[in-house]
Amino acid sequence: MTELANANIQHRKLSIAKIVKRAIAITIGALLMATGLEIFLVPNQVIDGGITGISIMLSHLTGIKLGIFLFILNLPFVFLGYKQIGKTFAISTVFGILLLSVFTTLFHPIPAFTDDILLATFFGGMVLGIGIGLVIRYGGALDGTEILAILINKKVPFSVGEIVMFFNLFILSAAGFVFSWDRAMYSILAYVIASKSIDAVVKGMEESKSAWIISDQHKEIGDAINARLGRGVTYLHGEGAYTGDDKKVVFCIITRLEEAKLKGIVEDLDPSAFLAVADITEVRGGRFKKRDIH
């Protein structure tokens, strides 16, 4: 019985189309990250956080090509995290790291696009972050720091984000000793810009929000959202824990640009209604596509 259950929940193999789509996305991501590193940041002695930052400093100190350090230092963490994160993730990550190593080696002879340190920091961090975000969005990674943080997280009372931040604090500070303290400060700026770019790509440029509305005028509010926003709604059954009364909950998905209008609709129809709005990382399927409003 147990074997049958295990057979039913086995991971399904990806289709050829999905594998090709993932491979293309990871290739583009690795290409962008290599561009950010070798054509913007590295020539201006600015580093990123994580294993990438360590690789840049070691490459500078030893004269060995950056791509070699990126490949050698990242691989152990991929194998360490194989059982925790999964086979597909591990294969995608190895593929991405291999491409990143090749691209950085090919791009190394290309002169920097700009010698302006501020422009290099801004655009390098942005291009780097977009590349990393694209790879993460399609199920891989280009830096082993987060994999290591996931493993450590199981043994210490800190979140993955806190562990990554702790590592990067030391790595980015080390840039002050290897290069100079102004370069360390520019490196922190590049890291922040890259982080924001990663979030934008992983979460999507068009931020979605979920709205939960509890009101006695649920039908009127639902109809108004449908008519004035062009969004579909779902009515959920609820029960008040204190009163025991049956409640209808209006649920809908909107964009951040529609949030103010939604609040106005609820305020007009029932000023005492309960309204909760939360950010959503991704929306798929269903009937989320906006209907035209005439």
Image (cartoon, rainbow, N blue to C red):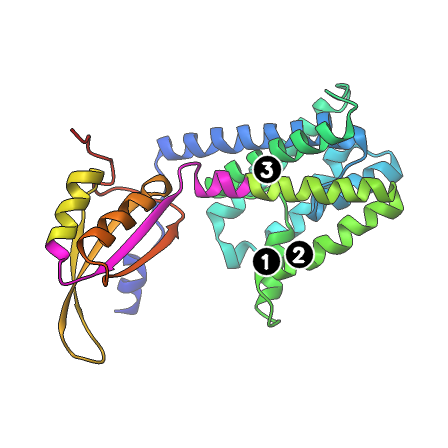
Measure the alpha-carbon separation of dots 3 and 2.
16 Å
Q: Residues within 10 Å of mark 1 (few under 14, many from 20)?
A: few
State how many labels appear.
3
Comparing 292 with 68, the one in front is 292
For the point 24% across and 36% down, which residue is it? Answer: 289
- Element marked by disc 1: helix
- Residue 66 visible to an observer of this rendering: yes
Q: Which amino acid type is marked by label 1?
A: Gly
Specify the quadrant that holds the C terminus.
top left
What residue does disc 3 label?
129
Report the side of 238 relative to 50 (left or right).
Answer: left
Q: Nearer the viewer, residue 230 or 179?
A: 230
Point 17% across, 53% down: residue: 269
Q: Is residue 137 left or right of 161 when viewed as pictured? A: left
Amino acid residing under circle 3: Gly
Give left or right: position of 11 versus 114. left
**Residue type at tag 2:** Met
Above or below, 289 relative to 157:
above
Q: Report the residue at 48% width, 49% height from top.
A: 87
Return the residue nearer the eye: 251 or 62: 251
Range shown magenta: 198-219
Q: Specify which label sits upstream in the sequence, 3 or 2.
A: 3
Q: Secondary structure at mark 3?
A: helix
If you read the primary sequence from the N terminus, does the residue marked by circle 3 or circle 1 appear first? 3
Asked if residue 72 can be seen in this view, the reply is no
Instruction: Residue 179 in the image: state x and y as whole percent.
Output: 87, 40
- The residue tagged 2 is 165
Which quadrant holds the N terminus?
bottom left
Answer with left or right where residue 47 lies relative to residue 238: right
Residue that numbered label 1 is attached to: 161
Callout 3 touching callout 1 (CB < 8 Å): no
Residues at discs 2 and 1 in contact (Cβ within 8 Å) = yes
